[in-house]
Image: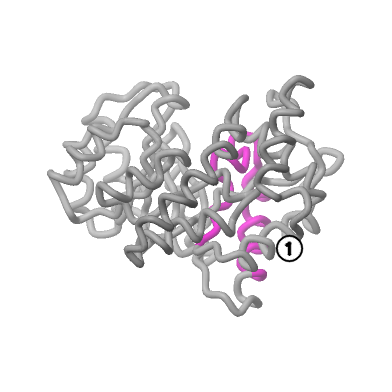
Amino acid sequence: MFEGSITAIVTPFRYGELDETAFRRLVRHQLNNGTNGILVAGCTGEAATLTGEEVKKLIIWADEEIRHHPKHAFLIAGTGTNSTRQTIEKTLAAQALGVDGVLLITPYYNKPTQEGLYAHYREVAQKCDVPIILYNVPGRTGVRLMPDTVARLSELDNIVAIKDAGGDLDAVSQLLVKTNQITVLSGDDTLTLPMMALGAQGVISTTSNVDPDRMSRLCEFWHARKLEDARRVHMELFPLCKAMFIETNPMPVKAALSMMGLIENELRLPLVPVKPESIPIIERALREAGLLERRS
């Protein structure tokens, strides 16, 4: 159901509040440059510091931009928390707004067992009808969704995909050996091509905030079996991907988008702008990619 380049879009702020004008501009920039889907309120969107009302606004604004654009794209909302009850409430709220899917991060801080993770996702799947994308990102949550657990969860009708940001290609291979009932999406920008070579169908990307065109072409080339073209674009993107993660995401990508004139470089505490010494690294990566001169 979900494939290609999906952008985990940043949440622009201005004087501490949502910047609707900048957000709509970002969504149009994505759609104009080939992005297949928009994820609002993911980790890159600073979901942890957004209120429920703010997430609702982001969903509505993104949906309006998508509906009025000639390119078809799907809309996903990040609704996962470390509370099963709150996750259900947020998922039902997003479902009522008509999203095409939800992204559910593994519960953080609680450190549930694999059986606890299975029970968490099963409970949400039973209470909600919207398609669910699992999100394995142990670097942020302290827990890892193991291949056996994902295979069990894939048997539930509305668990349709997994964003895997575990950085473990062996685990991805194990998962794909165990089941073909779930769509795998890369959660690590630099591993998008290697993961698609294993069987992933696309990526939920941070770097595509600043270069949606190349990231979408990478996926298109792979699906068209234009392997040399896909490899070339991967190599072109690689330095930019590395620059977008020199500090905690989304600090570098917000700095980059600010340099491109698309948003203010404003984050919510406890996140802060990147260190001064990171600025020239990000600027150089943008300039070498031709993005400081490129405008949508």
Residue 106 placement (x, y as % from top left): 39, 34
Residue 159 placement (x, y as % from top left): 29, 53
Rendering quarter of residue 246: top right
Q: Check if residue 204 falls in the magenta segment.
A: no
Residue 68 placement (x, y as % from top left): 65, 77
Locate residue 50 relative to residue 144 in the image: left or right.
right
Residue for point 55% across, 38% down: 241
Rendering quarter of residue 247: top right
Residue for point 62% across, 38% down: 46
Locate residue 296 relative to residue 146 in the image: left or right.
right
Can the viewer see residue 73 in this picture? yes
Query: Relative to 241, does residue 79 appear above or below in the rendering?
Result: below
Disc 1 crowd, CA 10 A, few/some/many (<14, 14-19, 20+):
few
Query: Relative to 170, does residue 129 appear above or below in the rendering?
Result: below
Q: Check if residue 59 falls in the magenta segment.
A: yes
Query: Relative to 246, does residue 118 appear above or below in the rendering?
Result: below
Specify the quadrant that holds the N terminus.
bottom left
Q: Which residues are magenta?
A: 37-65
Residue type marked 1 = Ser
* Residue found at the far right of this picture: 15
Residue for point 49% across, 52% down: 233
Residue hosting label 1 = 296
Residue for point 18% across, 44% down: 151
Can the viewer see residue 129 in this picture? no
Instruction: From the viewer's side, name the closer residue of 19 and 202.
Output: 202
